[in-house]
Image: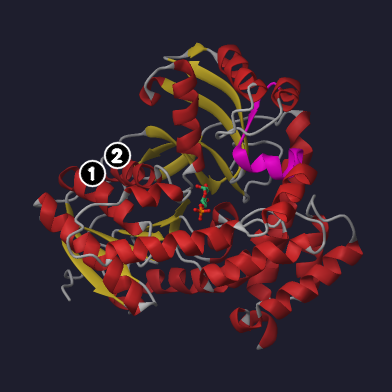
């Protein structure tokens, strides 16, 4: 294994890019089947970033070797000077890192399937990030993410933490409230939204800007601008027309939903606006998305193990991570190059959305440069979406509290606040079932 020398703290906030070949990017959860896509982006823009080392860390040594092996071959085939370091030791990966990307899944996909199935028993959609499924995932994930952040404070206090770990906004809120690391929460949904909207206009995404507001997986496009010209009406008309034709792309809504809101809701809002329909579909499907993903992953890992493979296979497109590499690498490039360009990311609200507390994490357009991501003013929320955002934000806040403290009361308060949970009785029962099904992953509740 090759490791880079410790350079923690050498560069200060506000200084421009690193010296060539110096930057170290560490990926926690590097054994993810998504990693080759990330590495592809890092190879492409490695020279611009001054990238020296990519460290992949994972608790699963077998996966790390298979995924890392493919990444090593990709780097070799591209003739890139990037040094790849593989490790099952977190401290080794974090030592001297400039950027830490977290993409962990506590309990793996097996636990995701459990998350998706429990809510169905209560006639609530079973989903990885939305509703009780996301709540369970958050409770398992918060302690691990906070311990990664604590290690970063010790080993690479100047590094940026780019968090992909779901539920991304909620986890970022836990980090903002309970650690001192510099963190930006990232999701591939905003960049996919930008590309889909640009596609409606038949224009390159670089010319399009979005007036976008909300929380992660709970966001709306209020306005669209092409080179600064308001083209919202044309975009909404196109989305409505597609909805009428039954196209189920990134905006799978009835035309009435889009027309009535006069905004473009993000994909995950279907779990609210079309809840009962999705619930029926899920019940009929017989298997959950997590079960599908388990199958796709087996195929992917078998492909990655083939020593003749030197690039990301097409099979990876069956996962939901489209453009995640572009989102991460362009965000890193904006910080390293002090570009002050707009990225839609999850950060502390400050005074961007006037209806939410300053300390809440929100997903909004930000100006990104060497000092991080500064949210642009979003003003007051339209009443049509204000209530839902407020409810879900209260749920997120309480889930963070429960995830940190292991307090059952906070856990019940959290789920009872969730718009998809109808009563206190259901919230209480759900908490009991979820805690029991996650016993091995919840030391904060069971070893208090
Ligand atoms: C979308 C979401 C991600 C999520 C992914 C799930 O891209 O924005 O937050 O992780 O879908 O994809 P999967 O293949 O795991 O179902």
Question: What's the residue at 68%, 46% (across, down)?
Answer: 357
The image quadrant that residue 444 belongs to is bottom right
Q: Secondary structure at mark 2?
A: loop
Q: Which residues are magenta?
A: 262-274
Label annotation for residue 16? 1
Binning the other alpha carbons within 10 Å of mark 1 as few (below 14), some (14 to 19) or many (20 upward) gives some
Q: Residue 443: where, in percent of width, then height? A: 62, 83
Binning the other alpha carbons within 10 Å of mark 2 as few (below 14), some (14 to 19) or many (20 upward) gives some
The image quadrant that residue 261 belongs to is top right
Alpha-carbon span between mark 1 and mark 2: 6 Å
Image vertical order of residue 221 relative to residue 421, above or below: above
Pick the front one: 147 or 300: 300
Q: Residue 138: where, in percent of width, then height? A: 61, 65
Q: Residue 188: where, in percent of width, then height? A: 46, 44
Question: What's the residue at 47%, 40% (across, down)?
Answer: 374
Residue beneath disc 2: 338
Horizontal side of residue 417 vs 218, given as left or right: right
Q: Secondary structure at mark 1?
A: loop
Label annotation for residue 200? none
Horizontal side of residue 250 vs 61, given as left or right: right
Image vertical order of residue 91 relative to residue 187, above or below: below
Pick the front one: 43 or 143: 43
Horizontal side of residue 319 vs 234, given as left or right: left
Question: What's the residue at 75%, 62% (across, down)?
Answer: 119
């Amino acid at each position: 294994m090759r490791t880079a020398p410790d350079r923690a703290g050498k560069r200060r906030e506000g200084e421009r890019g690193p010296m060539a070949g110096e930057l170290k990017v560490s990926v926690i959860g590097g054994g993810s089947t998504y990693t080759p896509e990330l590495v592809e982006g890092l190879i492409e823009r490695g020279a611009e970033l001054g990238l020296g080392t990519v460290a992949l860390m994972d608790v699963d040594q077998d996966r790390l070797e298979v995924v890392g092996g493919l990444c090593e071959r990709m780097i070799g085939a591209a003739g890139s000077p990037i040094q790849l370091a593989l490790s099952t030791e977190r401290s080794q990966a974090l030592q001297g890192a400039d950027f830490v990307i977290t993409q962990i899944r506590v309990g793996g996909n097996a636990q995701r399937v459990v998350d998706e199935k429990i809510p169905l028993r209560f006639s609530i959609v079973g989903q990885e990030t939305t509703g009780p499924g996301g709540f369970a995932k958050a409770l398992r994930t918060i302690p691990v993410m906070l311990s990664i952040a604590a290690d970063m404070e010790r080993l690479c206090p100047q590094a940026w933490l780019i968090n992909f770990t779901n539920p991304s906004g909620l986890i970022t809120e836990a980090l903002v409230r309970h650690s001192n690391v510099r963190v930006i929460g990232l999701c591939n949904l905003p960049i996919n939204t930008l590309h889909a909207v640009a596609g409606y206009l038949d224009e390159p995404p670089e010319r399009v800007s979005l007036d976008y507001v909300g929380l992660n997986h709970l966001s709306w496009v209020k306005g669209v601008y092409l080179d600064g010209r308001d083209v919202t009406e044309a975009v909404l008309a196109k989305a409505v027309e597609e909805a009428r034709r039954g196209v189920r792309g990134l905006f799978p809504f009835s035309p009435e939903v889009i027309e009535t809101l006069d905004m473009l809701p993000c994909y995950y809002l279907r779990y609210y606006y079309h809840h009962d329909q999705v619930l029926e579909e899920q019940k009929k499907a017989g298997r959950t998305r997590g079960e599908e993903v388990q199958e796709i992953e087996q195929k992917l890992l078998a492909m990655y193990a083939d020593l003749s493979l030197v690039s990301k296979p097409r099979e990876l497109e069956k996962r939901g991570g489209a453009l995640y590499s572009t989102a991460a690498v362009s965000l890193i490039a904006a910080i390293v190059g002090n570009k002050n360009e707009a990225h839609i990311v999850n950060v502390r609200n400050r005074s961007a959305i006037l209806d939410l507390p300053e300390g809440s994490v929100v997903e909004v357009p930000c100006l990104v440069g060497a000092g991080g991501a500064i949210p642009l003013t979003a003003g007051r929320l339209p009443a049509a979406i204000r209530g839902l955002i407020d409810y879900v934000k209260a749920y997120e806040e309480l889930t963070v509290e429960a995830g940190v403290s292991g307090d059952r009361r906070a856990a019940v308060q959290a789920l009872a606040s969730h718009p998809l949970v109808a009563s206190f009785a259901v919230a209480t029962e759900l908490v009991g079932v979820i805690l029991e099904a996650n016993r091995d992953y919840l030391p904060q509740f069971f070893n208090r």
